[in-house]
Amino acid sequence: MTSVFSDLLEDCMEVFMDDFSVYGSSFDACLGNLARVLELCTNTNLVLNFEKCHFMVKQGIVLGHIVSKDGISVDPAKIDVILSLSYPSSVREIRSFLSHAGFYRRFIKNFSKVALPLSRLLQKDVEFHFDEDCKKAFDELKEALTTASIVRAPN
């Protein structure tokens, strides 16, 4: 994807793995940029999945975040899942939780510091003991994940 769209990156589109977004400063500019992107897709035989294509939307979900003119926020559907989580009872569950929480680390101030008691349980030769510090860290991360404020992209 990066090689196909290298001339357009940071000019009128963003690419992440196999997803991309096209933008413009106005409706007409966006249409022109979209035409350039679709032409490149045609020229390089890049096939798009119609069901995953959304054109001229004011808001969309990208990698678990809602992106709109107001900024970037966590998808509310993810919040319900997080609220229903119980305390982890194994290293595997800790690893899974930290992996998911880490995806949203940019929304959480001092993420590494808060997650430290949980991270310690992932070290080799450490007995799994989910103590009060771990509960506090888990609850604090859940709270941060479910009350994240909207982050604005730089102008």
Image (spheres, grey):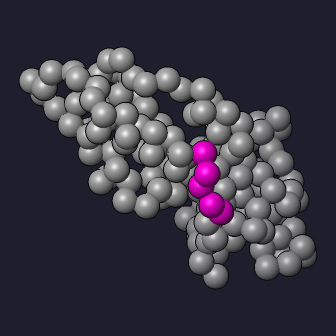
Q: Is residue 101 left or right of residue 71?
A: left
Q: Position of residue 31 (x, y in %)?
A: 87, 68
Name the residue nearer the viewer: 133 or 37: 133
Work out whether residue 120 can be spotted. Answer: yes
Q: Residue at x 82, y 63 (%)?
A: 35
- State left or right for residue 133 relative to residue 10: left
Residue 149 on the magenta span: yes
Is residue 67 shown left or right of residue 142? right
Q: Is residue 43 at all visible to an observer of this figure?
A: no
Q: Is residue 13 left or right of residue 1?
A: right
Tell me which residue sits at (45%, 52%) in the image.
105
Q: Residue at x 9, y 24 (%)?
A: 125
Residue nearest the observer in this picture, 97 or 39 = 97
Q: Is residue 39 above or below residue 143?
A: below
Instruction: Find the magenta span and give its range.
Output: 146-150
Could you tell me how many numbered marks the image carries?
A: 0
Task: Examine the rendered structure and indicate whether residue 123 appears above or below residue 146.
Answer: above
In the image, farthest residue toward the left: 125
**Residue 27: x percent and y percent?**
90, 73
Task: Confirm whether the magenta stretch covers residue 93.
Answer: no
Q: Position of residue 138 (x, y in %)?
A: 41, 37
